[in-house]
Amino acid sequence: MSNRLDKIIEENLSDDKEFDDVSKPAHYNNGSMECIDAIRGMLSHEEYIGYLRGNSLKYRWRFRYKGKPIEDLRKARWYEERLLNYELEHPSEQLR
């Protein structure tokens, strides 16, 4: 797992600091790597899928109650797109 985390850190050593509230919030981008990439580095395949699914559900669950429904729906979609891309990139790890 250390090699995978080292690779993620190296790939994310960038001065690109353009933030937006949905796909790259500033409060999750302190340091040399995004929080989501550190989370991926420490979770197993199944745990990471559960993390992405859970966050999508969280934003869909509360979108009517926090005052920013469109932003919350965009965040849910962001997690779903990340899950879709992850599944496409790891076809050998999918459940059959």
Image (spheres, rainbow, N blue to C red):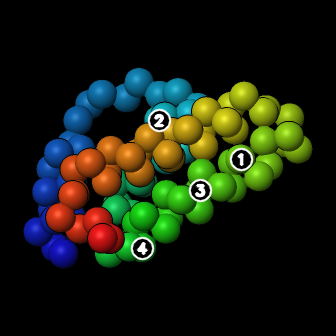
Q: Write the residue at 68% across / 31% down.
A: 71
Question: Callout 4, which amino acid?
Answer: Glu
Question: Callout 3, which amino acid?
Answer: Asn
Residue 47 lies, in percent from the top left, at 42, 73
CA gap, disc 1 to disc 2? 19 Å
Residue on which the image places disc 4: 47
Q: Quadrant of the C terminus?
A: bottom left
Residue 20 lies, in percent from the top left, at 52, 27
**Which label's residue is closer to the chain start, 3 or 1?**
3
Which residue is at the front of the view, 24 or 86?
86
Within 10 Å of disc 4 (Cα), the crowding (few <14, some 14-19, many 20+) is few
**Which label's residue is closer to the chain start, 1 or 2?**
2
Label 2 SS: loop
Mark 4 or 2, which is nearer the eye? 4
Whether 66 is drawn above or below 86: the answer is: above
**Residue 55 image label:** 3
Within 10 Å of disc 3 (Cα), the crowding (few <14, some 14-19, many 20+) is some
Disc 3, disc 2: CB below 8 Å?
no
Residue on which the image places disc 2: 24
**Residue 60 image label:** 1
- Image quadrant of residue 44? bottom left
Q: Relative to residue 85, is residue 83 drawn left or right? A: right
**Which label's residue is closer to the chain start, 4 or 1?**
4
Label 4 SS: helix
Residue 78 lies, in percent from the top left, at 51, 39
Question: Callout 2, which amino acid?
Answer: Lys
Question: Callout 1, which amino acid?
Answer: Arg
**Residue 52 appearing in the image:** yes
Q: Write the residue at 50% across / 45% down.
A: 80
